[in-house]
Image (cartoon, rainbow, N blue to C red):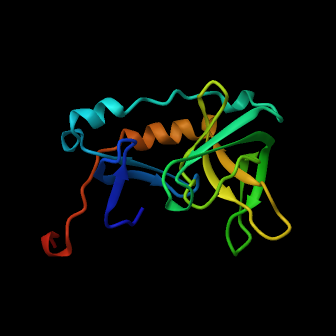
Amino acid sequence: QDADSLKVQFINDTVADAQVKGADSNMDLAVIAVRLDSLDEKTKNAICLAKLGDSDSLKVGEPAIAIGNALGYGQSVTTGVISALDRQIEISEDGSTTGNLIQTDAAINPGNSGGALLNVKGEVIGINSNKIGGSAIEGMGYAIPISDASDVITALMNRETRTKVSNEEKGY
């Protein structure tokens, strides 16, 4: 939300500047924008739209596929199952919790946050969000259900994109 600059790397390794359109800290979501005129035709043609699934109809035990940028090494894909639904986890040191998360044993590692959690049809059913770590814990990753996130994403997407200006260029 307070980033001074953002870069997006596309599947063909093209990198472009981006701006934050909006963020919702309660849902841990943000929408960013890239100017289409900053992308070449090859990059534009490499982009495909993700189809949204229905996270409300998920059942425990269904396959799950997590896509992200684990540890910043580049695109990664892990598989697992839906381990639980409607999970609440502690998200801060003050003990506050967030709820209604999808729990999966598909590896959600640092860098996967914001990536897609897919069903076997390739539909987005969640947005990778958190992982609980520790020596006694293994395979507990969490995703924001897409059915909960889609209205927030739509609202953020429809905001006007604002470009940050340097301190020297700001008015009074």
Which is nearer the eye, 11 or 34? 11
At a point 58% along the width and 52% down the height, the residue shown is 27
Indicate left or right for 29 with 34 as reference: right
Q: Residue furthest top?
A: 121
- Note whether residue 32 is visible: yes
Whole-percent x and y of residue 132? 74, 62
At a point 28% along the width and 48% down the height, the residue shown is 161
Whole-percent x and y of residue 59? 80, 31
Asked where in the image residue 140 lies, by quadrant, the reply is bottom right
Which is nearer the eye, 112 or 74? 74
Whole-percent x and y of residue 102? 73, 44
Whole-percent x and y of residue 95? 74, 70
Which is nearer the eye, 46 or 154? 46
Q: Is residue 12 above or below residue 167?
A: above
Q: Considering the image in quadrants, where does the C terminus appear?
A: bottom left
At a point 52% along the width and 53% down the height, the residue shown is 69
- Note whether residue 20 is visible: no
